[in-house]
């Protein structure tokens, strides 16, 4: 009776760990969270918007583009010439002033402005990419932490089972083989926990690198997987992607750049005018000072930018076809990402509502059978591993939901939450 009482008390402890595993993990998380800074997904995205080094470097290109506009508006400098000869007049000086006609300067400025706008589109594309990377890294850390917590709970449960096995062995109910099996299981679970902890450190370092924070700075993510993605219709997403996709916006802006380039080439077909004015000095018996002036015009006989204009026009037509293909491609990506998100949400709900409760019930039944002597420890370990597998698959499913949402947001081209 005393031996059965001991086994029963140990079994009760095991069941308490099984049923309260989530509570214990939550309490542990709350204790460690006191040493961490709170970080939500929106706060992480805002922090990356301000501090991400890749974004900072991309935004620095805006100053380069603005300087390009200023450079495009510069006018050609005049040339001052002075001459002295033995012939009369002995000295002369004149100024050569190039004059651009046909609106070349205005065309150059317009081209530089369109190139600056293309730089802004590229910056926006970088912002979208960084947003995708930060979202994936944030939920990657949450996933790694979930795996660490699950491994820690499994280790605690294995240690309790080992204590039950020792108690039953000492009571003469089971052979020493089951104690050895329990010891082996605890060693394996301890190694798995250490690996999970290292994976969590890697995930934390990845997130901090994107946020430009110290690699060891820890964050409290709270219940990162608690909030479900917002409900959106496919029609709404397709409409928004057509107006905001960075791929489409980039091609549209490249078309404007190419159109401005073609207009500049056409303007350059008109020859520039050179105005020269000055004076001659020291012509004995004739004059001491005499004004002079002349006009020069480039003759467009050999080069009228025909090749450049043809090349630019062909590039415009190629961009038009590329735009049509990109519009269809973006729509296809949005549709695929939308249906993938729906499938991931359904999978996570299936695990939460059906598979998790069933696996927990199986584990409890196996442990009850072991405690009453109707099953050996292998039955309990097999049941635990099945539960662990379901737990990991459920964690994979909720992580996949967030990854699918991130891909959908990237395909649409605008924030969706």
Image: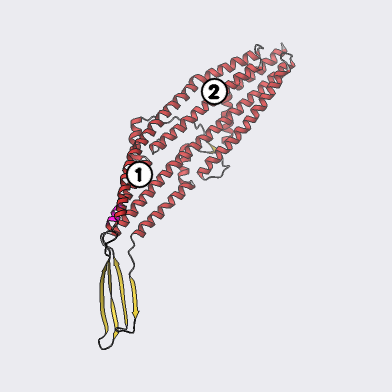
Q: Nearer the viewer, residue 295 or 165?
A: 295
Which residue is at 43% across, 31% downward? 229
Q: Which residue is mark 2?
A: 390
Indicate yes or no whether the magenta region holds residue 332. no
Which residue is at 69% across, 24% downward? 183
Which residue is at 55% across, 26% downward? 392
Q: Nearer the viewer, residue 146 or 270?
A: 270
Q: Residue furthest front?
A: 302
Q: Which residue is mark 1?
A: 251
Q: Which of disc 2 and disc 1 is earlier in sequence?
A: 1
The relative height of residue 273 versus residue 146 in the rendered view (above or below) is below
Other-residue count near label 1 (Cα within 10 Å), few / some / many at <14 / 14–19 / ≥20? some
Magenta-drawn segment: 262-266
Which quadrant would the C terminus be assigned to in this image?
A: top left
Q: Position of residue 282 (x, y in %)?
A: 30, 85
| Res 43 visible | no
Q: Determine the secondary structure under disc 2.
A: helix
Which residue is at 69% across, 12% downward? 4
On screen, residue 161 versus residue 82, left or right, reads right
Q: Principal SS element in the magenta part?
A: helix
| Res 203 visible | yes
Q: Position of residue 201 (x, y in %)?
A: 58, 38
Label ID, residue 317: none
- Foreground disc of the pair 1, 2: 1
How far is the residue under mark 1 from the one under mark 2? 46 Å
| Residue 182, quarter of the rendered image | top right
Indicate yes or no whether the magenta region holds residue 265. yes
């Amino acid at each position: 009776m005393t031996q059965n009482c001991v086994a029963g008390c140990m079994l009760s402890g095991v069941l308490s760990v099984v049923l309260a595993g989530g509570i214990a993990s939550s309490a542990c998380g709350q204790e460690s969270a006191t040493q961490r800074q709170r970080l939500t997904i929106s706060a992480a995205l805002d922090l990356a918007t301000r501090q991400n080094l890749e974004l900072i470097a991309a935004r620095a290109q805006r100053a380069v583009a603005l300087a390009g506009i200023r450079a495009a508006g510069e006018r050609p400098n005049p040339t001052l010439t002075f001459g002295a000869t033995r012939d009369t007049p002995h000295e002369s000086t004149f100024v050569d002033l190039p004059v651009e006609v046909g609106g070349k300067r205005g065309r150059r400025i317009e081209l530089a402005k369109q190139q600056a706008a293309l730089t802004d589109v590229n910056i926006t594309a970088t912002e979208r990419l960084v947003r995708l990377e930060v979202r994936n890294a944030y939920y990657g850390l949450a996933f790694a932490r979930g795996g660490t917590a699950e491994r820690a709970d499994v280790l605690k449960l294995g240690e309790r089972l080992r204590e039950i096995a020792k108690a039953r062995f000492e009571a003469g109910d089971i052979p020493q083989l089951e104690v050895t099996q329990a010891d082996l299981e605890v060693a394996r679970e301890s190694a798995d926990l250490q690996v999970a902890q290292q994976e969590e450190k890697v995930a934390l370092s990845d997130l901090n690198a994107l946020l430009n924070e110290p690699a060891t700075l820890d964050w409290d993510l709270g219940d990162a997987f608690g909030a479900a993605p917002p409900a959106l219709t496919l029609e709404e997403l397709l409409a928004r992607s057509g107006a905001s996709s960075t791929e489409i916006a980039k091609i549209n802006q490249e078309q404007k750049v190419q159109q401005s380039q073609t207009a500049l080439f056409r303007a350059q077909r008109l020859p520039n005018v050179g105005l020269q004015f000055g004076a001659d000095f020291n012509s004995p018996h004739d004059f001491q000072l005499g004004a002079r002036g002349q006009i020069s015009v480039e003759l467009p006989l050999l080069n009228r930018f025909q090749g450049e204009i043809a090349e630019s026009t062909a590039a415009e037509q190629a961009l038009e076809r590329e735009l049509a293909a990109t519009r269809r491609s973006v729509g296809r990506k949005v549709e695929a990402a939308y249906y993938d998100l729906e499938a991931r949400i359904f999978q996570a709900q299936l695990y939460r509502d059906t598979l998790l409760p069933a696996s927990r019930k199986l584990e409890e039944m196996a442990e009850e059978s072991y405690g009453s002597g109707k099953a050996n420890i292998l039955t309990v370990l097999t049941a635990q591993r099945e539960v662990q597998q379901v737990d990991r698959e459920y964690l994979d499913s909720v992580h996949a939901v967030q990854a699918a949402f991130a891909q959908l947001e990237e395909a649409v081209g605008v924030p969706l939450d």
